[in-house]
Each structure stands twice: as C-alpha cells, then as structure tokens.
Image (cartoon, rainbow, N blue to C red):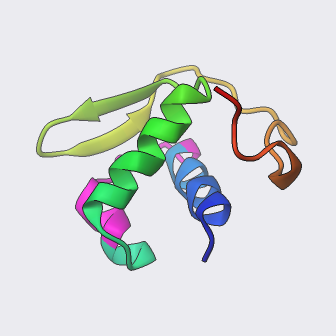
Amino acid sequence: MNRFDRVTAILIQLQAKRKVSGAALAAQFEVSVRTIYRDLRTLEEAGVPLLGEPGIGYSLAEGYPIRSGSCSSTSWPPKS
C-alpha cells in the first residue's frame, strides 16, 4: 500500500468516530509506529484536527466535517 492510500485509510477510520492507537495502525498497515506518526503529522499539516489521548489513541476533533472529494491523489502530496 502506498502512502497516499494509507493516509486516506487512516482518515477514513478516524471519520468513523473511532479512537485508534498508533501501534494498532502500525500493525494493521504493516509499517512502523514512527511511519504512522509521520502519517498523522501529514494529516495535521493538511488541516485535519487530530486529538491524541495518551494510552488511548487518536481521534478527529468533534464536529470536524470531511467533504467527499476533498482529497485526491492528484493533490498529493500537500504543498508546504
């Protein structure tokens, strides 16, 4: 799985109102926890408001709307 697909899959999981740990994501995508932290930072840099709870996991800020089609592989990677 490429990085875009993985970051998109992480966002979809967060949209489902799930709290998920970095370790669980790393196991699911067969990458290191450090890679997941980089992916989460990418989401934050793109304007996604993430909440992290030590020992519990990550979730989206309450009420954050995700528009369908707001992210595509043609707009990837985000420009700094």
Q: Is residue 18 visible?
A: no
Whether 27 is drawn above or below 16: the answer is below
Observer-nearest of 21 and 79? 79
Observer-nearest of 4 and 50? 4
Residue drawn 64% across and 54% down?
A: 8
Name the quarter where the N terminus is drawn.
bottom right
Residue 71: x percent and y percent? 79, 42
Whether 54 is drawn above or below 26: the answer is above
Residue 66: x percent and y percent? 71, 32
Observer-nearest of 1 and 58? 1
Residue 24 as seen in the image, left or right of residue 13: left
Residue 16 as seen in the image, left or right of residue 38: right
Q: Is residue 71 magenta?
A: no
Where, by quadrant of the figure, is residue 65 drawn? top right
Bounds of the magenta span?
15-26
Residue drawn 83% across and 42% down?
A: 75
Observer-nearest of 42 and 64? 42
Residue drawn 52% across and 39% down?
A: 42
Residue 43 as seen in the image, left or right of residue 24: right
Residue 3 as seen in the image, left or right of residue 74: left
Residue at the limit of the structure toward the left, as seen here? 55
Whether 59 is drawn above or below 30: the answer is above
Name the quarter where the C terminus is drawn.
top right
Where, by quadrant of the figure, is residue 4 drawn? bottom right
Q: Is residue 65 visible?
A: yes
